[in-house]
């Protein structure tokens, strides 16, 4: 393989066919470049999709009421469904082995004031377990607990952006902030890696806000996490049972999709995986088609090269050259061209991704990159492509009869 004369012949052949070799090598390099960039783009879209759900636990389910679209159980269509505290307790008792954490959500907007600073923010009144469903990261202080919930304490956990807006350089913990004119003591500050907008939010105990708004038991949504050991089919089966149970409880037609919405992240992840798998397959397919074109081009080069060197090959065989030596010569030349061209395309794609990949951050596309397995796969493709491109011309060269080759004009 490292015979000096063999490699000198390969370089001489390439030098003789510069333009043809360049164009064919370019097609191979371009195919590898497209392959890597397409796979990186698919990874970027996949990262973007997952980042949209990064601020919630991946085993989350959200139950939200709607307006019925069908008459059922003596009720007319157009009935607005209202969830209450009892619904959350009912689910907890109905699925004790399936539910990990569960919390109600009550939404409202508040005007917050501290000294001369004011701002309008969204407020979520929740149960203490909501911290684990939303993956709220408390950086200082604490989240409210069961004692705060039972005592209907006027305490608040504020987002990092809220703290910066209202308190500037002051330490917020222990201070009182007015929310719609009522004083709440700040007991914690949180950040949210998956959703920066969430840092402009305020959390408070659900019981406190239900008392403020007329001792109501109404809630806007139920958020929960299911048993983390469940796989996707079992998670989807559980959410279907949950939906059926809630529809029966509120007398909603089982086929009415508007009366009650149950969103399971497992379904979203399953859809994302299916979608990205299709994109990845299309990308690989396109790149392989381009690569096949390059292989055909290299095969043509080898055929022309052998035709031009027919007499030389005949002399070699007349002097005792074995067929495998002729095959090795042609295959080495083919593998050399594809490998060098492919690595140039691979390197160019890697440089582009390394330069601009980390700077791309958007809700639907984030940090396109390729992993080690992709690079190894591309390398194997290069070697196999080189062998395939030179295989038929090599076999043709090995089968040349010395007497025919020497009489060739």
Image: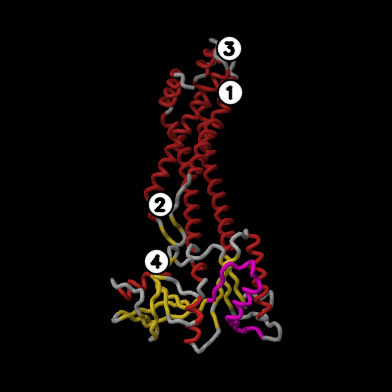
From mark 4 to mark 2, how far is it between C-alphas? 29 Å
Q: Label 3 to label 2, Cα distance in Å? A: 59 Å
The image shows residue 9, relative to residue 251, as above or below, that is above
Image-based side of 58 in relation to 113, left or right: right
In the displayed image of the protein, which residue is found farthest to the bottom?
214
Query: Dot 2, crowdedness within 10 Å: few (<14), some or many (≥20)?
Result: some
Q: Real-space Cα distance between discs 3 and 1? A: 15 Å
Nearer to the camera, 309 or 321:
321
Looking at the rendered structure, the secondary structure element under dot 1 is: helix
The disc label shown at residue 396, or none: 1
State whether residue 164 is above or below residue 339.
Answer: below
Mark 4 or mark 2: which is in front? 4
Q: Nearer the viewer, residue 140 or 336?
A: 140
Crowding at dot 1, Cα within 10 Å, few <14 / some 14-19 / many 20+, comes out as some
Q: Quadrant of residue 68?
A: bottom right
Q: Earlier in the sequence, mark 3 or mark 2?
A: 2
Q: Residue tagged by mark 4? A: 139
Q: Are marks 3 and 2 in contact (CB under 8 Å)?
A: no
Rendered residue at 62%/84% (across/down): 79
- Of helix, strand and loop, which one carries label 4? strand
Query: Disc 2 vs disc 1: which is toward the camera?
Result: 2
Please provide percent x and percent y for residue 155: 42, 79
Give the residue pinned by disc 3: 403
The question of residue 282 being in magenta is answered with no
Say whether marks 4 and 2 touch (CB < 8 Å).
Answer: no
Label 2 belongs to which residue? 357
Instruction: Find residue 317 and report its image quarter.
Output: top right
Which residue is located at x 33 percent, y 71 percent? 164
Q: Is residue 177 left or right of residue 128?
A: left
Could you tell me if the residues under marks 3 and 1 are in contact, i.e. CB atoms within 8 Å? no
């Amino acid at each position: 393989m490292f015979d000096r004369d063999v490699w000198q012949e390969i370089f001489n052949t390439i030098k003789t066919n510069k333009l043809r070799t360049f164009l064919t090598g370019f097609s191979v390099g371009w195919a590898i470049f497209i392959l890597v960039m397409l796979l990186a783009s698919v990874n970027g879209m996949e990262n973007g999709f997952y980042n949209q759900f990064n601020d919630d636990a991946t085993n989350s389910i959200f139950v939200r009421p709607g307006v019925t679209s069908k008459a059922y159980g003596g009720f007319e269509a157009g009935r607005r469904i209202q969830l209450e505290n009892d619904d959350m307790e009912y689910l907890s008792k109905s699925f004790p082995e399936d539910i990990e954490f569960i919390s109600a959500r009550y939404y409202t907007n508040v005007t917050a004031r501290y000294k001369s600073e004011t701002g309008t923010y969204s407020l979520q009144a929740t149960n203490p377990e909501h911290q684990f469903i939303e993956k709220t990261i408390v950086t200082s202080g604490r989240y409210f607990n069961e004692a705060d919930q039972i005592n209907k304490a006027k305490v608040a956990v504020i987002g990092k952006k809220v703290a910066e807006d209202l308190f500037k350089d002051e330490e917020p913990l222990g201070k009182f902030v007015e929310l719609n004119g009522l004083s709440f003591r700040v007991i914690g500050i949180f950040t949210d890696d998956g959703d920066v907008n969430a840092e402009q939010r305020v959390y408070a105990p659900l019981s406190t806000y239900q008392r403020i708004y007329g001792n109501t038991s109404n809630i806007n949504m139920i958020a929960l996490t299911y048993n983390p050991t469940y796989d996707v089919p079992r998670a989807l089966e559980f959410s279907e049972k949950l939906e059926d149970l809630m529809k029966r409880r509120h007398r909603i037609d089982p086929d009415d999709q508007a009366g009650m919405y149950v969103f399971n992240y497992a379904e979203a992840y399953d859809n994302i995986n299916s979608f990205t798998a299709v994109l990845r397959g299309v990308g690989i397919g396109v790149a392989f088609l381009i690569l096949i074109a390059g292989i055909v081009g290299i095969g043509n080069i080898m055929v022309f090269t052998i035709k031009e060197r027919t007499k030389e090959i005949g002399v070699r065989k007349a002097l005792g050259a074995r067929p495998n030596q002729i095959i090795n010569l042609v295959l080495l030349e083919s593998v050399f061209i594809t490998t060098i061209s492919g690595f140039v395309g691979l390197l160019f794609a890697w440089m582009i991704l390394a330069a601009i990949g980390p700077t791309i951050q958007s809700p639907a596309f984030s940090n396109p990159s390729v992993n080690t397995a992709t690079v190894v796969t591309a390398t194997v493709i290069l070697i196999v492509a080189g062998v395939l491109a030179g295989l038929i011309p090599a076999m043709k060269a090995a089968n040349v009869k010395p007497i025919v080759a020497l009489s060739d004009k």
